[in-house]
Image (tube, rainbow, N blue to C red):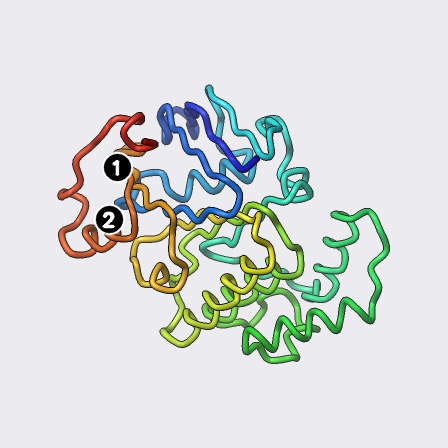
């Protein structure tokens, strides 16, 4: 049934960040959110994931037909929503292996077969060109920026979400690493064709690997234009001042 946001208004403290925001994603679609700094792009990903710092003043969020507005972050994750963070944190004393095994057990409510788990994880790390020692290292401790982003995609591949939020995943990645990361995301989508992706980015370079169905422009907390990959190229060439606002009806026609 996909993911729908209906007229969502969100604030942090006394400041409204998203205003009457709507978005509709069908299973298997790739959507992109672009916009100037402060437009509300990262706020959107955090609100979808249930960050308690943000107050939902009105509107609904439906995932597979169920309203997730009152669900906690861990409940949303169990339901199949995944956020690859813009700045992944380090967690001292918790290894990648321990974290993912625990997360899988919580998601499936079943014991994880250690042999199958390790085999799958080693294969995923090989696909991402990650050092095998990272399997047993504390999460992101001593990792470079690019290694942290690869680790986010490793977690995605192991947890197998249905709604994937990529918050500026391309920042901090060199050309080769970006290609590897995007190839792994596309491989995952090929194997899980009902999964949907919401990409938040400033630049169209990763969209050359992950071909979006829709590109949306966010300004002042709301969508003002929607189009194809050509819209992203227009933004790169001429900036956001070249974008003219259209109605919500025009965006989804």
Give the mark nearest the N terminus, 2 or 1: 1
Other residues around mark 1 within 10 Å, as few (<14) / some (14–19) / many (≥20): many
Apparent side of residue 22 relative to residue 112 in the rendered image (left or right): left
Q: Report if the CB atoms under discs 2 and 1 are less than 8 Å apart.
A: yes
- The quarter holding residue 169 reads bottom left
Q: For this view, does 200 lie left or right of residue 241?
A: right
**In the rendered view, would you say 5 is above or below 185?**
above
- Could you tell me residue 201's position as x and y percent? 35, 53
Q: For the point 32% across and 42% down, which residue is it?
A: 216
125 and 212: which one is in front?
212
Q: Residue 90 at x, y = what percent?
A: 58, 61
The answer to which image quadrant residue 112 occupies is bottom right
- Foreground residue among 33 and 253: 253
Label 2 sits on a secondary structure element that is helix
Q: Residue at x 52, y 29 (%)?
A: 61
Q: How far apart are marks 2 and 1 (CA)?
A: 9 Å
Residue underneath mark 2: 231
Q: Residue drawn 54% across and 65% down?
A: 187
Q: Name the residue under label 1.
A: 225
**Vertical arrangement, residue 132 with respect to residue 76, above or below:** below
Q: Residues within 10 Å of mark 2 (few under 14, many from 20)?
A: some
The secondary element bearing badge 1 is classed as: strand
Residue 251 in percent (x, y) is at 30, 33
């Amino acid at each position: 049934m996909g993911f729908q946001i209906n007229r969502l208004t969100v604030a942090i403290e006394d400041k409204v960040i998203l205003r009457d925001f709507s978005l509709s994603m069908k299973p298997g679609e790739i959507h992109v959110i672009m916009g100037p700094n402060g437009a509300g792009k990262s706020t959107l990903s955090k609100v979808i994931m249930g960050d308690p710092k943000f107050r939902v003043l009105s509107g609904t969020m439906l995932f597979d037909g169920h309203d997730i507005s009152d669900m906690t972050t861990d409940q949303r994750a169990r339901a199949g929503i995944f956020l690859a963070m813009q700045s992944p944190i380090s967690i001292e004393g918790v290894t990648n292996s321990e974290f993912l095994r625990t997360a899988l057990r919580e998601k499936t409510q079943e014991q994880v077969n250690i042999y199958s788990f390790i085999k799958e994880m080693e294969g995923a790390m090989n696909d991402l060109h990650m050092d095998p020692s990272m399997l047993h290292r504390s999460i992101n401790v001593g990792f470079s920026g690019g290694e942290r982003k690869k680790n986010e995609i490793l977690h995605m591949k192991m947890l197998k979400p249905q709604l994937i939020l990529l918050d500026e995943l391309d920042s901090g990645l060199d050309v080769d690493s970006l290609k590897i990361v995007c190839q792994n995301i596309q491989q995952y989508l090929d194997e899980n064709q009902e999964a949907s992706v919401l990409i938040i980015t400033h630049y169209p370079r990763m969209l050359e690997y992950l071909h979006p169905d829709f590109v949306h422009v966010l300004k002042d907390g709301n969508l003002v234009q929607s189009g194809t990959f050509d819209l992203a190229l227009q933004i790169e060439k001429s900036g956001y001042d070249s974008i003219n606002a259209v109605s919500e009806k025009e965006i989804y026609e």
